[in-house]
Image (cartoon, grey):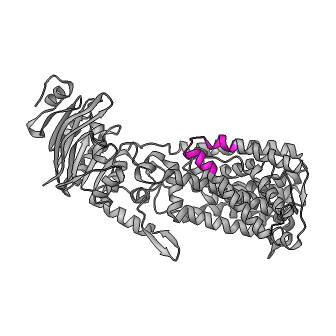
Amino acid sequence: MILGYLKEDTINKIIRGILVIPLFLMTENEIIKSKKKIKISNLHEIGLLIALILVLLLFSFTTENFFTQRNFTSILRSASYVGLIAFPMTFVLITREIDISVGPSVAWSGLFFVILIKWYDFSYFTSATIVILWGILLGYFIGIARTKLFIPTFITTLALWSALRGYSLFVTEGRPLAISNKEFRYFFGGDILGLPTVTWIMLGAFLIFWFASKYTVTGTNFYAVGGNPKAARNIGINVDRVKILALIGTSLFSAIVGILFVARVSSGNANLADGMEFDVIAAVVVGGTALAGAVGTMTGTLLGCVFISMISNGLIHWGIDPDLNKVVKGIIIFLAVVINSNVTFKSNSGGPKED
Amino acid sequence: MEILELNNISKSFGAIKALDNVSLSLRSGEVLGLMGDNGAGKSTLIKIIAGNFKQSSGTINFENQKVEFSKPMEARDKGIEVVYQDLALCDNLTAASNIFLTREIKRNFGLIKIINFAEMFKRAKNIFKELKSETLPDEEVKMMSGGQRQAVAIGRTKLSKAKVVLLDEPTAAISVRQVAEVLELIKQLKNQGIAVVIISHRMPDVFAVSDRIAVLRRGQLVANKLAKESSPEEVTALITGAIEKA
């Protein structure tokens, strides 16, 4: 019945297209040059891409308003907010750390930004600078707590998760703080050349993070520290500095996303970004990054962000209760970890291989 | 030429004397098998040479000059490298990336420095060729056999042009065929004039490559003799204390 929407040859083309994509990606990854060698991380990305296309087709055929430009813009927009934090989060997970404070951190950063403008009469630029510096400082604090006081990042960021949300609610008494600046709203909360501004910023960030992860010493060091921290230290990598840098990344980008959220909704709100840490970590893990560290790619994370946002969006189009939406996302992250740990670890379990 | 000389090295940890007046020397192109039971002082001695510990008394001469290392980096800069069995490699990186870790070859594009993978793969390939190992530079280490992993770890020391290489249990926990591969690697190092110390419990492996055998027992050097003038039976007796000294 669903397939009746399209002509038969169109369906054939789509199916052939889906089949060709993995082949195309495999060629790129030199599968032809070396017989048995498919990089596991790429395998995951290919699988995710196929899943993404299948989900896209599913929602497109089963709902009326999913396959529209307006809706795609909406998916892209929410994927972009998640993505901006998911890229640095990928590095954090790769170095075997975690930052679960990003949701409250985004809310507080946005609120802090509005407070500086409204209550202290700072300019938008100065306020943004202060909030960004705050983000860097917060990440530095988490990093120092981890490397000098040996407090697991899970604990530090759990404490921050509670403290930042609580303080935000206390300061505002739970009420939103509105600001009105049309230029700021239209630019950072609006569109440029048909795409949301935040999507352009996210794509820029993706390019930088993708490049850093593949072609720079800093990026290599994240992987080295996650792969074997003792070896990395022994070889002479400053492991503490690498971890602090990763943790500054998530806090800094939480601050940036906080400001961008304010631009979108024209107010600071203590309840903003509720549960965002879940979406971010889900996107990274669905994208193939191992919670145990060492494994993960920026391309995977980008696909993961789109995937998570598309599912959330599609479920709304299906008319599923937003609370049940959370249940579905919970199941997805669980399945992703099951697939992830089986693909990534079982097929080439660590340690020396016998010949 | 004596490249490394240890003179009357002692090391105490509180009341415990881990090393007692140990004197030992090493020539370029010589393989020394360092043997002893657990707690005999092998690790302590290696860590003093590598700059992890400072000796309580005694002196170290490297290339006829007195040296004092306060951290491993200083020993490494002089040309003394230790290959630890478990602490050497990052499994999730390629062989070349492991060899070049912290010493990556970079290309400058203004402010941005980009890793030059092509050059690193080429140089790593040459290093493996010198070591007569069939390790692929662009393969991830987690996919490799124990022998290939040792080749990567030893490849790091080649890159830094190390003059003394200390190998900690290089043949532990690998298959028989890979042991042969690792022993071949050690012979290649020797042929290139590098002084090698292997610390191992595996008697046949030590005798297969060593020119000289040194035995430590309870912190004292109880033997330091040519391998061909000794035998596994004698060394076993020295390790356990059945023979007092040789």
- Relative horizontal placement of residue A89, taking residue A38 as reference (left or right): right
Picture coordinates of residue A282, whole percent (x, y): 71, 48
Location of residue B116 (image quadrant):
bottom left
Q: Please tell me which residue lies in front, A22 or B230.
A: B230
Q: Residue furthest top?
A: B242
Residue B171 to residue A53: above or below = above
Instruction: Let me know if residue A145 is in the magenta part.
Output: yes
Picture coordinates of residue A44, whole percent (x, y): 61, 53
Numbered circles on residues, count: 0
Q: Residue at x 53, y 45 (%)?
A: A347
Q: Please tell me which residue lies in front, B241 or B228.
A: B241
Quadrant in which the C terminus of chain B appears: top left
Q: Residue furthest left?
A: B229
Q: Is residue A114 visible?
A: yes
Magenta residues?
Answer: A141-157
Quadrant in which the N terminus of chain B appears: bottom left
Q: Please tell me which residue lies in front, A115 or A103.
A: A115
Picture coordinates of residue A202, whole percent (x, y): 71, 65
Q: Please tell me which residue lies in front, B216 or A39.
A: B216
Q: Residue at x 52, y 64 (%)?
A: A216
Q: Is residue B170 visible?
A: no
Location of residue A66 (image quadrant):
bottom right
Picture coordinates of residue A224, whole percent (x, y): 49, 53
Instruction: Let me know if residue A9 is in the magenta part.
Output: no
Q: Residue at x 78, y 62 (%)?
A: A259
Q: Residue furthest front?
A: A120
From the image, give the main secondary structure of the stretch colored magenta: helix
